[in-house]
Image (cartoon, rainbow, N blue to C red):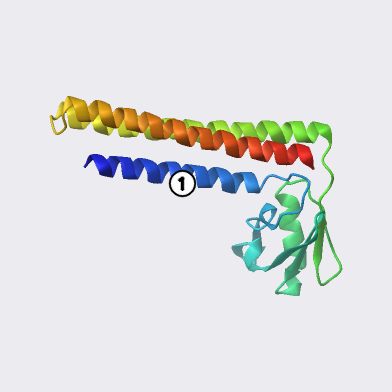
């Protein structure tokens, strides 16, 4: 029972960290990355479809994304969706391929992105604190119902706090790495 609480705690924390990593990969750092545009939703014959399912997204050089659509008739819809996503990207096409030049980041834009990165890290830490609160509530309920001893209660509570601290340090490292990547480009 107590091990189940810890397993669920770790599972939730791992999912929170992977969500943070995924959201940070979508932040433009001045280097082309297919993940920046792959989840953009395109209206494909009345159906909402992610861009990655409508074409092959490549990075022929560090400052360029190239999208090779499977259906050439949908290039206009794909361009419209990229512009509507408000990522600051301007697609251009030659009738066969959509090319997106990734602009160099200004110092102001780098500062803004650094704030966004830090904010997402803090949001993930808030999620961790909520996970800890839920685990502690379950432990309190078990203690109140006398299903666990006082010693087990304190031992598992300390374990939960130690695990949360460890994952919080991971978040700090991920945020610092992304901010460093932003500064070095």
Label 1: which residue? 15
Q: Nearer the viewer, residue 91 or 135?
A: 135
Res. 143 image quadrant: top left
Evaluate whether residue 154 shows in this view: yes
Query: Which percent across, then down, holds residue 114?
Result: 70, 33
Query: Which percent across, then down, holds residue 86?
Result: 73, 46
Q: How many residues crowd mark 1 within 10 Å: few (<14), some (14–19), many (20+)?
A: few
Query: Can you name the residue that lies furthest to the right here?
Result: 94
Residue drawn at x 70%, y 74% is 70
Residue drawn at x 77%, y 50% is 31
In the image, residue 136 sits, relative to residue 69, either above or below, namely above
Apparent side of residue 169 relative to residue 9 in the rendered image (left or right): right
Res. 60 image quadrant: bottom right
Apparent side of residue 24 relative to residue 104 in the rendered image (left or right): left
Evaluate whether residue 127 shows in this view: no
In the image, residue 31 sits, relative to residue 129, either above or below, namely below
Q: Which quadrant holds the C terminus?
A: top right
Apparent side of residue 131 relative to residue 17 in the rendered image (left or right): left
Apparent side of residue 159 relative to residue 146 in the rendered image (left or right): right
Residue drawn at x 77%, y 35% is 110
Q: How many numbered discs?
A: 1
Element type where label 1 sits in the image: helix
Query: Which percent across, then down, holds residue 62?
Result: 80, 55
In the image, residue 94 sits, relative to residue 182, either above or below, namely below
Query: Which percent across, then down, holds residue 108?
Result: 81, 31
Q: Which quadrant holds the N terminus?
A: top left
């Amino acid at each position: 029972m107590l091990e189940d609480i810890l397993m669920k705690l770790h599972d939730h924390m791992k999912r929170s960290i992977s969500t943070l990593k995924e959201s940070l990969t979508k932040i433009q750092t001045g280097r082309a990355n297919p993940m920046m545009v792959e989840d953009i939703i395109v209206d494909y014959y009345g159906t909402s479809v992610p861009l990655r399912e409508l074409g092959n997204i490549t990075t022929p050089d560090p400052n360029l994304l190239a999208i090779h659509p499977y259906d050439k008739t949908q290039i206009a819809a794909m361009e419209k969706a990229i512009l509507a996503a408000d990522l600051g990207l301007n697609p251009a096409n030659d009738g066969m391929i959509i090319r997106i030049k990734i602009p160099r980041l200004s110092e102001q834009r780098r500062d803004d992105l650094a704030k966004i990165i830090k904010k997402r890290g803090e949001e993930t830490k808030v999620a961790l604190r909520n996970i800890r609160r839920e685990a502690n509530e379950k432990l309190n309920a078990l203690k109140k119902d006398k299903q666990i001893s006082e010693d087990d209660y304190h031992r598992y509570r300390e374990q939960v706090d130690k695990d949360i601290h460890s994952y919080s340090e991971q978040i700090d490292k991920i945020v610092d790495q992304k901010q460093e990547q932003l500064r070095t480009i």
